[in-house]
Amino acid sequence: MPSLPVSRRAFLCAAASVVVGACSGTDTTTGSTTSTRPSTPPAPPDSTVDAPATAPVPTEPAATAAPTTSLPPVELPGDPFTLGIASGDADTNGVVLWTRLAPDPLNGGGMPSDDVPVTWEISADEAFTIVAQTGFEIATAANGHAVHAVVPLPAGIHFYRFSVGDYFSAVGRTQAAPAADAATDMVRFATGSCQNYEDGFYSVHRDIAEQRPDFLVWLGDYIYEGAGVPVGGQVVRSHGTPEPTTLDEYRNRYALYKADPELQASHGACPWFVIWDDHEVENNYADLAPQDAGDAAGFAARRQLAYQAWWEHTPTRLPPPPTDGSDYQVYRAAQWGDLVGLALLDGRQYRSDQACGDARFDLSPACPESADPARSMLGGDQEAWLRDTVGEQGTVWNAIGNQTVMSDFTLNGAILNFDQWDGYPAARDRLLGDLVDRQVPNVIVLTGDIHLAGVATMTHPASDQPVAVEFVATSVSSDGLGAEGLAPILQAFPSIVDVELAHRGYILHEVTRTTWTANYRMVEDATFPDTAVVPYKSFVVDAGSTAVRVVTG
Ligand code: FE
Ligand code: CA
């Protein structure tokens, strides 16, 4: 690819001048303006320029100050927008817009060591006939040239794009959330999780892009950390690289995933709210305990690097994680008008280590350790925060975005999976007991992790009070449990409304003031690209009830 000599100073000045009136140098890291002007169509990325094609059309005299070229030029070896674009953490004021500059995505990004200004633009139409707002953000080398631009948006659908020099990103579609007290009659949103690249293709994401929901909640396992397996074995496409432990290796793993065009389209369709599970760091890690105790030395540092890479690739308002490895709070609240409150949990960073040696499918009664009331899934601070959040947002529905299955799947005292809430029964009882005590209505638990589609009603064991309905999205692509005969065992639980293990998919929720409808959509065969995604069943909960109706089959 031809190199593109671009003046860093010229970029910064041109982008900044709209806001500050004149170039103020590199100490300004962000800026924006609202204007209405004709857009500049993208120019072919083969010209040599010293000012970006997106340089805002001057709207005031100070903006006409000529950019200087006193700083050395930044050479871009190619299109920096290989990882696509995204928006996320929509609130009443707007969204955060994300991209990361990476001309050589699988090899550390391929960017020069300079910090680079990136222009963003907002338009009401997909063709950018009129640019309504523009601004810039500095993509720093220290943060992998990731961009997190917090952009105010009025109500309605908006389109956004980024540019650097003559390079333009794809166009994304996004929207702000209705005001917290705005009477909101309806919302459509998706929940999904678990997209192991090696196990399958992303037809789910193609379908989400076509469905254009209002937003998506990602429930974890965005990447998988496993080492590459040769294609022709058990994988349909290989990670191709060893298990990541360094920042560059985690960045390259994210880049492999984010280069997928269907995943990019899904991000481009709506704002995402993203939380993580274990595979963003390592399978089944618990706080600072790695999967294998022998890897404990250095795990804290590895986790911090994995968190940094997560932040660099996530459209979130959160700051980057602390560099000293101390806790990084990602649990947070969101809401969609007065209709849906959303508590987004972190069930990994503060949990007690899995009990009883993290046994799997052991049918003997669980060891006493599992019942220790001191054991926690969320940690004390997050438990207290959750009590202050669920049911306190003034919304019709109170949803909890959660990593691992919360419903009770214990079998005659046996815990089949110590990694999910069954392995933390005292913590679950505290959570459910609090919901009963405060009589929180219309609680919906949204869950990922387990690679099966499930619907369950949840009851507080001490009071026998029904508390919530749990909707478990199956995986986007990650292999299912594959346990022959498990479906009838699970289906026999009185709490389970439905379970389906054989297909990959996601849930498209349609929520009104009177009903919550979870439309399960499934991929016919995720091991092939371009596979059909079809309706499975729809499950309806009426407000004021925890009964679940199956409306289609
Ligand atoms: Fe998973
Ligand atoms: Ca998981």
Image (cartoon, rainbow, N blue to C red):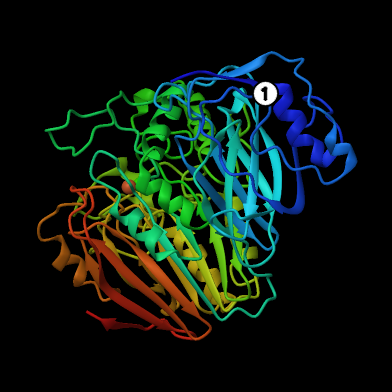
Give x and y (percent) for residue 20. 85, 38
For label 1, the residue is: 50
Q: Residue at x 26, y 59 (%)?
A: 452
Residue at 15% across, 60% down: 486
* Percent position of residue 4, x then y: 55, 21
- Secondary structure under badge 1? loop
Q: Local crowd at mark 1 within 10 Å, few (<14), some, or many (≥20)? A: some
Instruction: Using the image, determine if residue 486 lies above or below residue 44.
Output: below
Q: Please, is residue 384 above or below residue 512 in the view?
A: above
Is residue 246 something one can see in this rendering?
no
Question: In x, y percent, where is residue 326?
Answer: 61, 32
Left or right of 155 in this view: 548: left
Is the residue 34 above or below the residue 20 in the image? below
* Residue at the spot 21% in from the left edge and 55% down from the top edge: 531
Question: With 62 as the anchor, is 451 left or right in this view?
Answer: left
Which residue is at 48% across, 25% downward?
A: 78
Q: Quadrant of the N terminus?
A: top left
Residue toward you, 294 or 48: 48
- The kind of residue tagged 1 is Asp
Name the residue nearer the viewer: 200 or 307.
200
Q: What is the x, y in percent for residue 343? A: 56, 61
Judging depth in this view, the residue of 119 and 126 nearest the camera is: 126
Give the farthest residue toward the right: 61
- Seen from the viewer's position, the closer of residues 23 and 469 is 23
Quarter holding residue 197: top left
Q: How many marks?
A: 1
Q: Quarter of the image holding residue 207?
A: bottom left
Q: Quadrant of residue 75?
A: top right
The answer to whether 219 appears left or right of 381 in the picture is left
Q: Is residue 280 above or below residue 441?
A: above
Q: Is residue 106 left or right of residue 347?
A: left
